[in-house]
Structure formats: structure tokens, C-alpha cells
Amino acid sequence: MRLAILGLASAGLADAFTPSLHAPSLPTARSHASLGLSTAPSALKIRPTGRSARSSAVPMQMGLSARHAGALAAVVPRTLASQNPVTVAAGLAAVLVGVLYVLLKIPSRAYKDGEGTVGKEYDAWTEEGLLEYYWGEHIHLGYYDEDDRKAVMNPLKSSKVFKDTKYKFIEEMYKWSGADKPAKVLDVGCGIGGTSRYLANKLGDDSTVTGITLSPKQVERATALAKERDLNNVDFRVMDALKMEFEDNTFDLVWACESGEHMPDKRKYIEEMSRVLKPGGTLVVATWCQKEGDITPSEQKDLNFLYEEWAHPYFVSYEEYGRLMKGTGKMEQVREENWVKETITAWRHSIWVGVWDPWIVIWKGLTTRAGPMLWWKTIREIVTLNRMHKAFESGLMTYGMITAKKTA
């Protein structure tokens, strides 16, 4: 398993899966033509027939029409039987890699409006425990300097630095917001409460912090961790950020770190946070964004995968968040920045911490109800993390920081 993860973490991850379906064990171009089939690998589509068709829940989607299935079923066994076993094994391995390559390009967790998609996903991740094991109490990117970047490839330091950069991010975000000892803080999309507890401890007993999330399991875990640390000035609630139950003008600081990505209505998201903010209070948002301006068809395809693999309705630019804040008519001193340079390292760093310490994944795959499917899910996460890195690296995605004050 460790070798498998290491291989995936190597240059390009999913790009390393470059299938070749031209192995000698497959029918030649001439035999394809005699069947009336395209010779292009992408045109192949293999469907089980007879008993296997009835027992197979997921046919292999590779482009071959149903009317050629019988002919292919007759040709392939004879062709394979005439080949050297090593050649046959290599051909079958190539096909398997091709199937995996296709499956890894198909997103599996699309956002579905009204079905509680986001809350259910975070419930599952919280119960699974892997996210907390690797990411710690903070399910957000870290803030990196040059020394942190050098530690990524050091198996003795990598995990600790990965978690430490998240505390640095909180400190940098707080400082950048310009907030000054807020008495009441709201953490919108609090996860398992890492930031809420950190701020509660940092600000002391003169302040109170409330964290909200759609996930009951996250509230349960966040509350347990606060109790372990004897923190009495922090609490957690299950609540929809688009329909908050708080009165107007309640909080001195509204903090939203990587929750905007999941919001199906970005305008309502900003309006609700502005509503519950006190006059003179600070709103600060950190969120993954897409670039401003035109999106090419290829870029849109990449964005669609990122939307549909991690239950995101859509992204907007950080400039758009700034416009939404101004559009409330309540916010002033709006500032926007792109923190890609400071945060991008976290995407691949999160892969490497798993490479250096894969044992919990192996163990849970052997001992929990999830079984070996957990390994497949982990591979999907590795591929998605790398695709995120590439999207930020190319400029398709940005890391938006937006802050403003509510008019007094």
C-alpha cells in the first residue's frame, strides 16, 4: 500500500496513469476493421454478456457499441490464447490501468441541492477519522514560509510542520483582518472546531466563540475536544450559514475559513454574515476561488471535476466576494488578496504526510466496515489533491482573502 501511495504521489499522480491499449494481446488494427470497429483506444467499450451481464452492476465504459460485444467476445479469447503469458499479463495490466485512469477522471460526490450533501460528507469524514489523523484539528490549508516548504520531504518533520502551518494560518488571518480583541466571535463552517478553540484560548475568558456547521458529527467531536481542554468560552451548533438563527448585530468578529466553497448561494452567504455582525465589527473570509474573467472549455472541465468530487456547488472569484460585500450596503473598507503563494504547498504536502505514514489507512482498510474500499477512496483523494494543486498553480484557482468592516 505504501508503495502504491508513493507511486501516486510521484510526478503528476493521475497523469502517471497513461494507459496503452495497443498491446500485442489485443486484436490488430486489421482485425478491428474486419469487425467494423474503430482502432482508437478511446472507442473501446466492453460490456459483459449472458450471466456476467446479469451479475455485473457497472459495465466498463470505454466506447464499444453493444452490437459488437459478441464479436469482440469471440475474438479476444482466441487472440489472448495465442500470446505469450507475459504478453497477456502485460496487456491485461494495461487495460486495468486504463480502467482506473477513466474511473479517476469521473467525479463521485457531486453537490445535490436540498439533500444535505455537505453535512453528510463531513459526517462521514469525521467518523472515518483519517482527516483528523492527518490534518489535525484544522481542516484548512496552512500558511508556509521557505523553511516549511523544505520540511515537506523530510519524513521526520513533515507531519508536525503540516499541522503547525495551520496554526500559523489562523494567526496570519487574524492579524490581516485587523480585528481588535472581539468580545463575541462567530466561526462559520467550524469543522471539528480547531479554529474556534484556538481563538477562544487566544482571546481568553473575556470573549466567547461560537462555531456552526452542517455536520452533527463535527459538532459532537468539536464539543468533546473543547471539554478535554477545559474551554468554557466556546460552543458549537448545527446550523445553516444561509439561514442563521442569531439576531441582527450579534458578533464583533465573523470568521469564515474555507466554508464559502460549499455555499450554493454566495450572495446570501455574505448577506447573512453581514447581518449578524455588529456595527463596527469585522468580517473576514478565506476561501478557494476561481479566477476572474473568461473560462475556457478545458478550464471549465477541470472546474467541473473539482465541483463534483468534493460537493462544491460552484466557485466565484475573490473579486466577486469583494463586490458582494460592497453590495450589502453595510460594509466598508473592503480589502481583497490572493494568498496562493502562502498556501499552495499544503495540497501536495497533505499527500506526502500520508506517504510517510500510511499505516492507519492500511489498518482501517483491513479492520473496519469500509474495508479495502477505503484504499480506493484514499487513492481518489490523492488524485483530487493533486488536481487542486495544479488548478492553483495554473492560475485557474486562487486563494481569496476578503475582509471588511460593518458601517457604524
Image: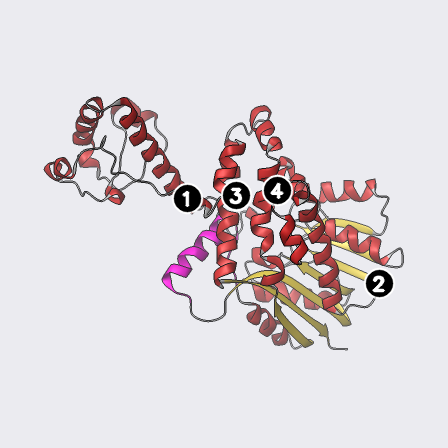
Q: Are marks 3 and 2 in contact (CB under 8 Å)?
A: no
Which of the two marks, 3 or 1, is nearer to us in this view? Answer: 1
From mark 1 to mark 4, how far is it between C-alphas?
Answer: 20 Å
Question: Viewer-proximal residue, 401 or 18?
Answer: 18
| Residue 283 visible | yes
Pick whichever of labels 4 and 2 is earlier in the sequence. Answer: 2
From mark 3 to mark 4, how far is it between C-alphas?
Answer: 13 Å
Read off the residue under disc 3. 381
Q: Determine whether, in the image, residue 78 is placed left or right of residue 153.
A: left
Find out whether residue 306 is within the magenta segment.
yes
Crowd rating for badge 4 (residues with CA inside 10 Å; few <14, some 14–19, many 20+): many
Above or below, 79 relative to 321: above
Residue at (62%, 71%) from the top-left corner?
336
Q: Determine whether, in the image, residue 361 is placed left or right of residue 404.
A: left
Q: Are marks 3 and 4 in contact (CB under 8 Å)?
A: no
Read off the residue under disc 1. 16
Read off the residue under disc 2. 183
From mark 4 to mark 2, how far is it between C-alphas?
Answer: 37 Å
Q: Amino acid at mark 1?
A: Ala
Task: Give the quadrant of residue 256.
Answer: bottom right
Segment colored magenta: 295-315
Which of the two marks, 4 or 2, is nearer to us in this view? Answer: 4
Pick whichever of labels 3 and 4 is earlier in the sequence. Answer: 4
Crowd rating for badge 2 (residues with CA inside 10 Å; few <14, some 14–19, many 20+): some
Read off the residue under disc 4. 353
Provide residue 331's location: percent of width, then percent of height. Answer: 68, 75
Pick whichever of labels 3 and 1 is earlier in the sequence. Answer: 1
Q: Amino acid at mark 4?
A: Val
Crowd rating for badge 1 (residues with CA inside 10 Å; few <14, some 14–19, many 20+): few
